């Protein structure tokens, strides 16, 4: 464990005061004089030809500034989702990766419900919505493809002619000798799992405001996680130099996945076209229909194991329902493949994923991208193996866990950057015992036996998660001191609830030698810094912190040199603490503020002017965070209702900058996972309409759904950065659905439930109960199951 | 343009006479005309509670109320509770308990909890179940609620919200 003056301590959040007074500034709060409001007219069909669009009535409606359809977009480039894996990865695994254009506004054909068909700009949103209703679109419905298996059939309509068929990508990996090991195993089993579509659902809506000024260029305020990427995409499609675009991401009401959306491009386009600032704020149905859809995988798993429950071979064939486009290449399918072995030693492994285009919303990374499904599959497999062998599920995990002395451990599966996946540090067996002890596993089993005798159905479920964190492009930071002693961090990251104003300041305070009170952070703005990766993939604690630490250390060195030069003392022995520079004997030489005042031109060091420094950091590869989840719950056998009782998670995020912040990320993540486990499902009807298009039907967990959640920390520093940090933003979500499904099965034991699906709403639990009852009657009649 | 009607709203203690379209929702009046940006719109369908205000003292979702329905009624937003001892205590407890992350749900949560704690005897604080039940009026995607519950209970116990030293 590492602590500095403030690193490692539960420093109170420095961003709170504005939020507590309702003074946060989210995109819908940014006011520009003369801004007009845009509304998107969207497709009501999953698949249809557009015969004709009549905008005449809409264009003449009160307050309308402009109505735009695909025919008007003659002056934009094409939006082509970025598909390709890095060469190091592509050369190793030779994935199939096909690309196609994505129209910004549907041209001639719509391919999903919600696809933008036209834009209306009006004086206010009410008027824009009125006018949008007056746009007449004549559609000729086509047969939609609504599940990936159907999309693969030869007779299926091809959704993007460019692709030739509906397969967008395919990737696979083989480790060891899965065929041989499977054939030699004492036992084998085969399972099908279906993980339904879920939606990231941040509470704050997506929103974009744009202004085009002939002198300043384009300024875009967007609720995006990646302002620099947004700038690049906008510039590329609208043909504007990146340096003429500023993307600002002010406060943001969460995100949980995402990237650059159509509207991030269309609204700036409109602002330029109509010569006025244009604002667009989505409503909740628009969000649920269009943004951050995730999961939606079908798994066909075979497993070979011995009589102690050791997994000898595992094979998984995965189908991903990609929706109409894949904006993120192999991120989701390959995250599933590379996380499926989890904390377990499985020497013989084969997995392949096929991403199939369907007439639905694009499938994208959302909190726990690809990993939620991986954890669900592997943990369900272990649970079933334990049941089959009549072993304690905890024991089956014990025999499969990678032992601590095997660390660092190479899983044999390359990561998405083409590097080996090497678990850099950790002690999984100790983590399991930590979680079991915290929940008092033995005591629970005794209580369970007593309650069972009374006819109550309480269960316990275990799951583990691994999380490759810190992925992606470099992150950059500038640290600057002004003449008043105020320290400013400019970061390329993007804070949307992760407490960066606190944690990055903690890192900076120790690295520079100043009081945290003197530091403020600015991020989420391309004007601040040349490069920024943004915040996703649990990366900012790793990459953002290291960039800040690097810049602060450089600045400290520079300040010491300046002080030595100006005051005629030796560099050796000079220290910076509390912003004061002292010599080895503790005598005050100068302060950072004084230096900033006197050395503005920088000539004394021959270096850059002013008291500032910059650094960038990219993690050599991902750092591996881990966790073990244990949940207890009770199932009402008559209604299928699940009542969660207690939730314990033991986890390792390496050195922790701020334990309270980490706990907040984990508890919040677990609750996100509880929703994924029990209630959140994007349901489409047979015509391809999203039925769960409101928070009434897409049900997020509420305060009474949530049990007490206990977080226990292990701290195994990462060896990949000198702060020893691993990320922690998604792990809570990753392990929760698996643990809960396992606990539901356990609760109903000895009734032999076979849960193959998530989420588990009460009606599904009742269905499993009925199936298990029917099977047990069948077995009594001598029929074999499994 | 559509016809307007004249309404008088008492917002944070100040009377406002406005001409509004009958279809205008209260939340839009508060946000767009009065720039009360603590009103957040997370769903516009009465589910998330981010737009919660006190309507004649009762927590209400301002996205489901038409401005004309609020004629002559008193509306209190988070801005209007600034400096109130109960609210100050609640805000301090939220800060001390890390009970917010992105902050989007926070104003609605605070207003809702304020109405639970206002005029309440600190020696009879609400139970955890009572707090959680009250919080059912608010969705939060970030915190998992636990820290908010702890903050509310702390604020309730100490009356003004600050734990006694
Ligand atoms: S915006 Fe009013 S309840 Fe969600
Ligand atoms: S803090 Fe983000 S929704 Fe509650």
Image (cartoon, coloured by chain):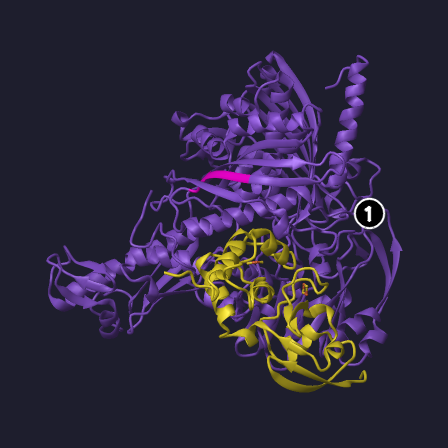
Quadrant (top left, top right, bottom left, bottom right) of the C terminus of chain A = top right
Residue B42 can be seen in this image: yes
The residue that mark 1 highlights is A685
Residue A377 image offset from top left, x and y in percent: 63, 32
Q: Nearer the viewer, residue B83 or A654?
A: B83
Please report the bounds of the magenta region as a residue range. Answer: A647-653
Mark 1 crowdedness (10 Å alpha carbons): few <14, some 14-19, many ≥20? few
In the picture provided, is A640 more to the left or to the right than A176?
A: right
Answer with the quarter of the image where residue A603 lies.
bottom left
State ligand 2's quadrant.
bottom right
Residue A572 image offset from top left, x and y in percent: 14, 55
Query: Residue at coordinates 63% horizontally, 14% vertically from top-left?
Result: A187
Q: Is label 1 in a helix, a strand or a loop?
A: loop
Query: Residue at coordinates 12% horizontally, 56% vertically from top-left?
Result: A584
Query: Residue at coordinates 71% horizontally, 28% vertically from top-left?
Result: A754
Q: Which chain is yellow?
A: B
Residue A582 image offset from top left, x and y in percent: 16, 61
Q: Which chain is purple?
A: A
Q: Nearer the viewer, residue A445 or A540?
A: A445
Answer with the quarter of the image where residue A459 lies.
top right
Residue A16 image offset from top left, x and y in percent: 47, 64
In the image, is residue A170 part of the stretch drawn in magenta? no
In the picture provided, is B121 more to the left or to the right than A718?
A: right
């Amino acid at each position: 464990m590492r602590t500095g003056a403030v690193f490692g301590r539960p420093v109170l959040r420095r961003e709170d005061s504005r939020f507590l007074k309702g003074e946060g500034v989210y995109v819908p709060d940014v006011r520009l004089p003369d801004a007009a409001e845009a509304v998107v007219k969207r497709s009501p069909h999953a698949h249809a030809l557009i015969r004709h669009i009549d905008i005449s009535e809409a264009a003449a409606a009160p307050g309308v500034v402009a109505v735009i359809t695909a025919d008007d977009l003659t002056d934009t480039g094409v939006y082509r989702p970025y598909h390709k894996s890095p060469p190091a990865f592509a050369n190793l695994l030779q994935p199939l990766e096909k690309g196609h254009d994505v129209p910004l506004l549907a041209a001639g054909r719509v391919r999903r419900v919600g696809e933008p068909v036209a834009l209306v700009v009006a004086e206010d949103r009410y008027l824009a919505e009125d006018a949008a209703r007056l746009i007449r679109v004549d559609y000729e419905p086509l047969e939609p493809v609504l599940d990936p298996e159907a999309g693969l059939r030869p007779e299926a309509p091809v959704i993007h002619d460019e692709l030739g068929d509906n397969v967008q990508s395919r990737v696979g990996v083989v480790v060891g000798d899965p065929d041989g090991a499977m054939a030699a195993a004492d036992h084998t089993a085969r399972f099908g799992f279906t993980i339904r579509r879920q939606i990231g659902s941040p509470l704050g809506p997506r929103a974009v405001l744009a202004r085009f000024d002939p002198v300043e260029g384009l300024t875009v305020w967007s609720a995006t996680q990646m302002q620099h990427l947004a700038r690049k995409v906008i510039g590329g499609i609208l043909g504007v130099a990146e340096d003429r675009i500023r993307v600002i991401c002010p406060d943001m009401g969460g995100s949980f996945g995402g990237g650059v959306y159509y509207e991030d491009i269309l609204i700036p386009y409109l602002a330029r076209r109509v010569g006025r600032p244009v604002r667009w704020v989505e409503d909740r149905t628009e969000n649920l229909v269009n943004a951050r859809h995730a999961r939606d995988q079908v798994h066909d798993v075979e497993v070979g194991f011995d009589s102690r429950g050791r997994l000898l071979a595992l094979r998984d064939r995965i189908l991903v329902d990609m929706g109409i486009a894949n904006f993120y290449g192999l991120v989701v399918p390959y995250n599933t493949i590379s996380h499926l072995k989890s904390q377990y030693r499985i020497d013989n492994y084969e997995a392949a994923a096929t991403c199939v285009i369907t007439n639905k919303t694009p499938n994208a990374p959302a909190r726990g991208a690809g990993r939620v499904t991986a954890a669900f599959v592997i943990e369900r497999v272990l649970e079933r193996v334990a049941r089959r062998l009549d072993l304690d599920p905890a024991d089956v995990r014990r025999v499969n866990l990678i032992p601590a002395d095997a660390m660092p451990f190479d899983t044999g599966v390359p990561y998405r950057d083409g590097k080996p996946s090497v678990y850099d540090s950790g002690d999984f067996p100790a983590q399991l015992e930590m979680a079991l002890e915290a929940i008092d596993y033995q005591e629970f089993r005794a209580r369970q036996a007593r309650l069972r005798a009374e006819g109550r159905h309480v269960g316990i479920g275990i799951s583990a998660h691994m999380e490759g964190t810190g992925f992606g492009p470099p992150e950059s930071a500038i640290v600057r001191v002004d003449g008043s002693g105020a320290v400013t961090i400019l970061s390329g990251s993007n804070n949307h609830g992760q407490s960066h104003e606190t944690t990055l300041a903690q890192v900076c305070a120790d690295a520079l030698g100043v009081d945290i009170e003197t530091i403020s952070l600015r991020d989420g703005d391309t004007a601040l810094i040349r490069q920024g990766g943004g915040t996703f993939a649990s990366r900012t604690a790793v990459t953002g912190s290291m960039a800040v630490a690097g810049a602060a250390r450089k600045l400290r060195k520079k300040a010491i040199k300046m002080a030595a030069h100006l005051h005629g003392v030796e560099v050796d022995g000079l220290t910076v603490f509390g912003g004061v520079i002292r010599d080895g004997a503790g005598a005050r030489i100068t302060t950072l503020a004084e230096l900033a005042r006197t050395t503005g031109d920088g000539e004394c060091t021959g270096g850059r002017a002013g008291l500032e420094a910059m650094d960038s950091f990219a993690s050599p590869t991902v750092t591996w965070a881990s966790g073990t989840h244990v949940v207890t719950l009770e199932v009402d056998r008559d209604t299928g209702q699940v009542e969660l009782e207690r939730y314990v998670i033991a986890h390792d995020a390496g050195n922790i900058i701020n334990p309270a912040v980490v706990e907040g990320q984990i508890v919040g993540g677990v609750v996100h996972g509880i929703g994924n486990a029990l209630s959140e499902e994007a349901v489409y009807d047979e015509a391809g309409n999203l039925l769960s298009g409101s928070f009434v039907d897409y049900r997020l967990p509420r305060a009474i759904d949530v049990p007490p959640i206990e977080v226990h920390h292990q701290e195994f520093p990462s060896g990949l950065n000198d702060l020893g940090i691993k990320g922690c933003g998604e792990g809570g979500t990753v392990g929760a659905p698996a643990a809960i499904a396992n606990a539901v099965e356990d609760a109903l034991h000895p009734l032999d439930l076979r849960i193959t699906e998530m989420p588990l709403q009460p009606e599904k639990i009742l269905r499993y109960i009925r199936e298990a009852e029917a099977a047990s009657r069948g077995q009594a009649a001598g029929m074999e199951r499994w | 343009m559509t016809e307007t009607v004249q309404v008088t709203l008492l917002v944070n203690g100040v009377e406002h006479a406005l001409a509004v379209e009958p279809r205008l929702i209260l939340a839009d009046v508060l946000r767009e005309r009065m720039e009360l940006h603590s009103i957040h719109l997370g769903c516009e369908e009465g589910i998330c509670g981010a737009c919660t205000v006190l309507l004649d003292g009762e927590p209400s979702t301002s996205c489901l109320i038409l401005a004309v329905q609020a004629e002559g009624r008193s509306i209190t937003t988070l801005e209007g509770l600034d400096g109130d001892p109960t609210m100050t205590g609640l805000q301090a407890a939220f800060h001390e308990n890390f009970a917010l992350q992105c902050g989007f749900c926070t104003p609605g949560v605070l207003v809702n909890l304020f109405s639970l704690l206002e005029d309440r005897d600190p020696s009879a604080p609400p139970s955890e179940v009572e707090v959680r039940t009250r919080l059912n009026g608010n969705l939060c995607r970030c915190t998992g609620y636990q820290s908010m519950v702890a903050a509310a209970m702390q604020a309730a116990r100490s009356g003004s919200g600050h734990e006694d030293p």
